[in-house]
Amino acid sequence: MHPKLKLIFLAHSGHRGFALPFTLGVGLVMLLAGTVMIVRSQSDQSQTKAQQSTAEGVSAAEVGATRIAQLMNKNRYIAIYPDCIDRTESTGACNDSGTATFSWANVSNLPKLTVCNSENAGAIEDVSIDRAWTVIDSNNSAQGEYRLIGYQYSTPGTAPGTGKLTVEGRTKQLNDLQMGATKLEVQIPVSPGTPDQNNVPGVWLVEGGTGNNEIQGDVLLGDCDADPATINVTGTDPDTGEAYKAQHTNLQFPELPEIPASASNLGVLGEDLGVTAANLSGDITLPRDSDSSTPQTIKGQEVAVYHYVVDAINFSSGHHKLTIKPGYRVNIYLQGSIDVKGNTEIVHVCTDDAGNAIANCQPTDFKIFGYGDSSSTICTAGNKRVEAFILAPEYTVGTAGTGGGKGGLKGSVWANEWSNGKSCGSNTSNTAVVQTGRWDELGLTPKNTPPQLSAASTWQRQER
């Protein structure tokens, strides 16, 4: 007992009846003090548990946001569409349907979402269609679970824009999952997609594969029935050191450029039943001394480009030769077909007779744009290689004959179909294409490039 209390007690010990009430009062005070301490301790403990529960809920929501962002990165086209347009809030069910509704819950409508498979389509629908909870770790329920509350996008269907991802996470506390539920809002900047700035694909086809022809370059296939494993690809990219590969793509060809009004019309090159006095035959060299160029900006620099409209190049017989001067940029806007066989040839090379590189010369300086229909063909010679870039969306292309592997194309060819045993007889084992060129050299951009997702700009907890 405290000394002062003891003295008071002794001083009044002579007064009967005082000691017992006093002792009971002191005990009551001590009991009240202990009760307050216990209540405060319990309050602090509850607050600590609440804080812990909230922190665990935030952690679960962060895991969910990260996983959904990863799903978006695998299927970047969904980043420019909302998760749901018509949702019943009371049940969480998404009612989106119809071909005109574009959302995650109606994923089959999203254009070019996946490349030749739908393995992620189900995961996209599952995460969005009814706000179902997803367990973080099925082997450890203490880690909690998460669900998508919503994803809105500022400019649906286009980029740039900003996505707002809202995710809810919760953990199990005293058998009550709701105690740890926390909402998290994440802002995700989305920008337009850009093509790979490394070498452009050596061959890009809409239909089929390349048969037995060997391709020293990357091959892009738009036909899901064409097996990349059957494409004969060899060599490595000199810029990256990575092996060339064949793969499916959901990219689409760039638009054919508009033919400049200043382009010279050469008619039909070579001998043909349709040749007129105005058409050219024999040996032809471009650009001619009398031709004028037009300025064009490539890689940030203004360069001179010579433009020519050609109805057809018929070098199927005789001794014809079309020569593109090295170091000059020449565009041919082809209206019909090209047929190069036998002793005829198209010549554009960026090396001299000793094999030394010619200054200011790139294979892609010579471009052929094909405007013909699906009956049009481009057949190059198997014994003479031409350096060029070819974009012919409706054409069948190929290399006629073997020529000891000396023919074909150095550059890139993008067309509808490879001539597997058809008009060009291009089904041999020679190297038909040797890849070279870069996107910035072409001045072209493919369509349907997937948007780019930047790192989240803000992570903000939302009050429930």
Image (cartoon, rainbow, N blue to C red):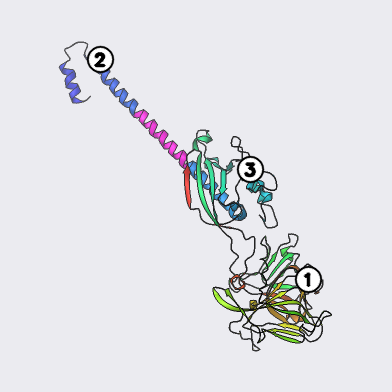
Q: In this rendering, does residue 136 appear at all?
A: no
Lower sequence index among marks 2 and 1: 2
Q: Are marks 3 and 1 in contact (CB under 8 Å)?
A: no
Magenta region includes residue 34: no
Q: Nearer the viewer, residue 112 or 305?
A: 305
Residues under labels 2 and 1: Cα distance?
115 Å
Sort mark 3 into few (<14), some (14-19) or many (20+) by Cα contacts within 10 Å.
Answer: many
Q: Image quadrant of residue 196?
A: bottom right
**Quarter holding the N terminus?**
top left
Residues under labels 2 and 3: Cα distance?
71 Å
Q: How many marks?
A: 3
- Secondary structure of the residue carrying tag 2 is helix
User: Which residue extends farthest top?
Assistant: 16
Q: Is residue 339 left or right of residue 220?
A: right
Lower sequence index among marks 3 and 1: 3
* Residue at the disc numbered 1: 376
Amino acid identity at mark 1: Ser
Residue drawn at x 59%, y 53% as measured from the top left: 80
Front disc: 3 or 1: 1
Q: Is residue 33 left or right of residue 71?
A: left
- Secondary structure of the residue carrying tag 3 is loop
Lower sequence index among marks 2 and 3: 2
Query: Which span is picked out in magenta?
Result: 37-55
* Residue at the disc numbered 2: 21
Q: Is residue 237 left or right of residue 399?
A: left
* Residue at the disc numbered 3: 129
Q: Position of residue 368 (x, y in %)?
A: 69, 75
